[in-house]
Image (cartoon, helix red, strand yellow):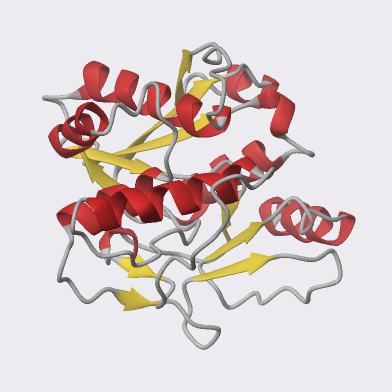
Amino acid sequence: MNKYLVVIPYIHTEAQGNELEYAIKGWFKHFRDPFHLVVIGDVHPFVLENLHLITFIPKTRVLEVPGQYRPHLDHVAKMLRICEHYKGRFDGFIQAADDCYAINDFTAKDVLIPKAGGYDIPPGDIDDENGFWRDMEKTRRRLVECGLGTLDWETHAPRFYKFDEYAELAAEHDLTNQSYVVENLYFNTYYQGLHPLILTPENRFIQRLESKHQMIDASRIWLSNSVYGWSPNLESFLKNHFEQ
């Protein structure tokens, strides 16, 4: 019986290459616990070719909301659909990014360990033209308003959410209409006072590639990339890894 539910939200127009295919292959090659994988969002040929292994839930993008960052609203809409669909069959879900690739074996313990960057969300500009950073500042202010900590939990590593807690959080902060960085709201709310594992360049969990010229550390469990970190070198590395 599958013990864990792994969910990858996917927006085709934001993909730069075959990230989703490599992200999926990483779970099947390296996750050592029984799991069921769901892709929710836009269609992808690799997913359609592997429906014997993967559940695909089509989900159109939410409409633009003035002043809100659409990708964060999209994310919440998809995860609330997952909460409705799978509650009662699993305790919660592991949310995984479509540009996070496992390249070494790992277990649920590696996912479930709470991880953070080790610093508070830095004050930013609420009027920043970059929607992500605007939401980071908006989230920081919301946390302060609620009397919660402002630790930055945004690591891009897979993370586990409980269904009831996620739905409760969405209702409390009106997340279907107000865009926030959900992981920072969630973990500062439900893990307040917890001392997470601090991700550093020295530990083995994840390497976030921020540049096309950054050297790949093949000792990590996961590789991930920013928009600027996706490169022919990374794609070649992943292609060779999954063809072995």
Residue 102 at x, y percent in the picture? 54, 58
Residue 159 appears in the picture as rendered: no
Is residue 207 found left or right of 13 in the rendered image?
A: left
Q: Nearer the viewer, residue 62 or 32?
A: 62
Residue 136 appears in the picture as rendered: yes
Is residue 239 found left or right of 140 in the rendered image?
A: right
Q: Quadrant of residue 149?
A: bottom left
Name the residue: 49% across, 82% down.
Answer: 200
Q: Relative to residue 214, is residue 15 depicted above or below?
A: above
Residue 140 at x, y percent in the picture? 39, 56
Q: Nearer the viewer, residue 39 or 36?
A: 39
**Considering the image in quadrants, where does the N terminus appear?**
top left
Q: Nearer the viewer, residue 243 or 192?
A: 192
Name the residue: 46% across, 27% down.
Answer: 73
**Considering the image in quadrants, where does the C terminus appear?**
bottom right
Name the residue: 68% across, 57% down.
Answer: 225
